[in-house]
Image: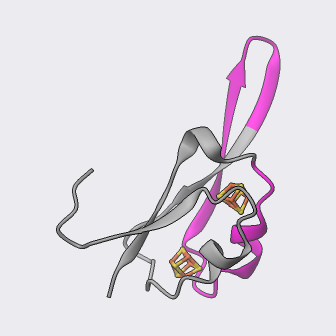
Amino acid sequence: MNKIKIEKSDCTGCMNCYEVCPVNAIKEIHYNVGDSEYKRAGLIIELCVGCGLCSDVCQQLAIGEVNEKDNS
Ligand code: SF4
Ligand code: SF4
């Protein structure tokens, strides 16, 4: 089964993916740029079962599948 990859630069931090993940494999990552704080989605790869629900709800198309062999 393929797991997913979140493209950080495309993620707006809407957290739709977080809401739908059945196994809590997505976490919020907070970061700062200058004085502003932002958040984005981060993947807990060990928990992901590759169901693809997060990819379905990502309007930014920031979530794609990766092969198990793909280390990129
Ligand atoms: S649904 Fe997409 S844009 Fe929204 S937090 Fe998840 S990866 Fe980022
Ligand atoms: S593919 Fe499924 S299990 Fe993996 S992070 Fe997305 S919603 Fe969660």
Q: Nearer the viewer, residue 47 or 56?
A: 56
Which residues fall within the magenta stretch? 13-38
The reply, left or right, for residue 17 in relation to residue 16 is left
Residue at the spot 73% in from the left edge and 74% down from the top edge? 57
- Count of number-bearing discs: 0
Q: Is residue 5 above or below residue 65?
A: above
Instruction: Please state if 68 lies on the left or on the right of 12 as rendered.
Output: left
Residue at (54% x, 73% y) in the render: 25
Q: Quadrant of the N terminus?
A: bottom left
Q: Is residue 69 above or below residue 38?
A: below
State the residue lying farthest toward the left: 69
The colour scheme of the drawn protein is one colour
Asked if residue 44 is positioned above or below residue 39 in the image, the reply reads below
Q: Residue at x 64, y 60 (%)?
A: 61
Say if the magenta span includes residue 37: yes
Q: Nearer the viewer, residue 59 or 6?
A: 59
Image location of residue 42, percent across then percent down? 56, 54
Quadrant for residue 41, please give it: bottom right
Q: Is residue 55 magenta?
A: no
Q: Position of residue 4 (x, y in %)?
A: 44, 69
Q: Residue 30: horizontal and vertical position, in percent?
A: 69, 39
Q: Quadrant of ligand 2?
A: bottom right
Q: Residue 72 in the image: x percent, y percent?
A: 27, 50
The answer to whether residue 26 is left or right of residue 48 is right
Residue at 60 percent of width and 56 percent of height: 62
